Image (spheres, helix red, strand yellow):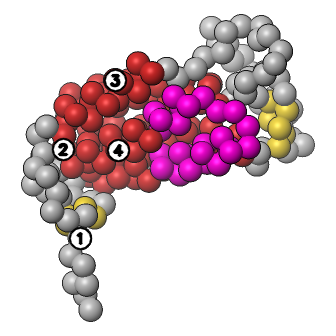
Amino acid sequence: MVVLNKIYTKTGDGGTTALASGERRPKHDLRVEAYGTVDETNAVLGLVRLVTGEAHPDLDAVLARIQNDLFDLGADLATPESDEPPAYPPLRVTGPQVAAIEAEIDRFNADLQPLRSFVLPGGSAAAAHLHMARTVSRRAERLMTELAEREPVNRDAVVYMNRLSDFFFVAARWANARGEGDVLWVPGKNR
């Protein structure tokens, strides 16, 4: 259980932060950047849910589960693998979480017609916000894959992030009147 009695600790005033293991790293460390961008994705989802709550309750329920998964993912990234036995079992993103997001992609995509062009971000407010979540989650994924080249990262966590951006794309189309409100790219339209 998490208990936060005091919000400021002053321990980060020197430009470092503590990982879940207690190890201190610079605030600009790649691992910190990665889980910080996962947190940013979660914050964007908070905005998305302001416009999906009443308009798309089924989608909103999925987004609520994803927000919880993103906290799991942040905890996963904040707990690097170590040769030392942990004081408690680390929280890791798992294959079933990946499978669940894949099932949601398939479920929402089933209502959509195949694309004949790329989609420009926009259409409805929900779709525009979901496209923003998609781009932030892609940035988190890029940081995670860069981190994975330097130190161990849970593969399921990386796969989850990859699927998540796909989910946001499908969900944006679905929120755009099941794709009818998609704004399609017209190559060279303004030449």
The residues tagged by marks 4 and 3 sit, at their Cα atoms, a distance apart of: 13 Å
Image quadrant in which you'd find residue 52: top left
Q: Which residue is mark 1?
A: 185
- The answer to which of marks 1 and 2 sits earlier in the sequence is 2
The residues tagged by marks 3 and 1 sit, at their Cα atoms, a distance apart of: 31 Å
Q: Nearer the viewer, residue 50 or 23?
A: 23
The residues tagged by marks 1 and 2 sit, at their Cα atoms, a distance apart of: 17 Å
Q: What is the three-letter code of the residue carrying label 2?
A: Trp
Span highlighted in magenta in the image = 137-161
Categorize mark 3 by other alpha carbons within 10 Å: few (<14), some (14-19), many (20+). some
Residues under numbered marks 3 and 1 in contact, where contact means CB atoms less than 8 Å apart: no
Categorize mark 4 by other alpha carbons within 10 Å: few (<14), some (14-19), many (20+). some
- The answer to which of marks 4 and 3 sits earlier in the sequence is 3
Residue at the limit of the structure toward the bottom, as seen here: 191
- Residue 106 in sight: yes
- Camera-near label (2 vs 3) is 3
- The answer to which of marks 3 and 1 sits earlier in the sequence is 3
- The answer to which of marks 4 and 2 sits earlier in the sequence is 4
Q: Nearer the viewer, residue 152 or 185?
A: 152
Image quadrant in which you'd find residue 34: top right
Q: What is the three-letter code of the residue carrying label 3?
A: Ala
Q: Which residue is mark 3?
A: 100
